[in-house]
Image: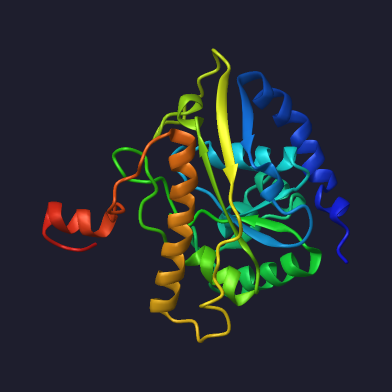
Amino acid sequence: MPNQAAEKTVGFRALAAVLVPFLSSIAKIEFTDPQKLPTTGAFVLSPNHYSNIDPVIMGWSIWKLGRAPRFLAKASLFRVPVVGAVLRGTGQIPVERAGSVRGSEPLKAANELVEKGNAVIIYPEGTLTRDPQIWPMRGKTGAVRMALEQNLPIIPAAHWGTQAVMARYSNKISLFPRKTIKVAFGDPVDLSEFRGKPINSALLTAATELVMADITALLEVLRGETAPVERWNPAAHNQKETGRFE
């Protein structure tokens, strides 16, 4: 059985000693069903994404609940002085291109993730949502691929309020007044119909849509609104605007 206390490495604790007091001064978190975040064992956490500060807020959220967050990070960042040391010291996962879980390094890290019983946060949208109303857009398949290949549960999550701390596409933090951020966790996404089958594009796309549906349902509750029936598709929108795919 992995030692869960080992999740919070010296590097993590040093980083938290700096970040947590600052974050607590500018925002507070209100949890919905925090008990749905697994207290032990490896899992993939998949939240919505609409602000550049989302990873910090989501990492802080699961830290408050006793877990230590891991993220996929560009491999090039691991070669940057100081930044690389922080990433390695906190067990982040290197990838050669943003959002990808293909390749030997992510696979090695994923195996270690399972062995050590750690959690990894993967944003299925891959980038900030392009939906005009900040609803989750069509997801990419990286989170589901890791969950299926490593036989991990995938936990949907949603948050609302980070846009008041840092607006979409902005890098400016709003310090005052102190903001309230709502965070919700869901039950593990039911991927039973996909497990044990050959992994291909169609299977990953269908499984990813289940994940995005669960994330959207959580966000609907937090916002007190109903999401559009049709999920925003950046590729289709780009084709409509330019007449071609990119």
Q: Position of residue 140 (x, y in %)?
A: 42, 62
Q: Position of residue 188 (x, y in %)?
A: 61, 60
**Identity of the residue drawn at 61% across and 68% down:** 106
Horizontal relation, residue 229 to residue 241: left or right: right
Q: Give the quarter of the image for residue 148.
A: bottom right
Q: Quick one: 128 or 82, which is closer to the camera?
A: 128
Q: Quick one: 14 or 221, which is closer to the camera?
A: 221
> Is 238 situated above or below 210?
above
Q: Where is residue 245 in the image (x, y as percent from the top left)?
A: 20, 63
Color theme of the render? rainbow
Please, which residue is most extreme toward the bottom here?
A: 198
**Identity of the residue drawn at 67% across and 68% down:** 110
Q: Quick one: 22 or 230, which is closer to the camera?
A: 230
**Identity of the residue drawn at 64% across and 54% down:** 78
Horizontal relation, residue 111 to residue 135: left or right: right
Q: Where is residue 222 in the image (x, y as percent from the top left)?
A: 49, 36
Q: Quick one: 60 or 40, which is closer to the camera?
A: 40
> Is 84 situated above or below 142?
above
**Identity of the residue drawn at 58% across and 16% down:** 178
Horizontal relation, residue 1 to residue 36: left or right: right
The N terminus appears in which quarter of the rendering? bottom right
Horizontal relation, residue 194 to residue 85: left or right: left
> Is 65 situated above or below 114?
above
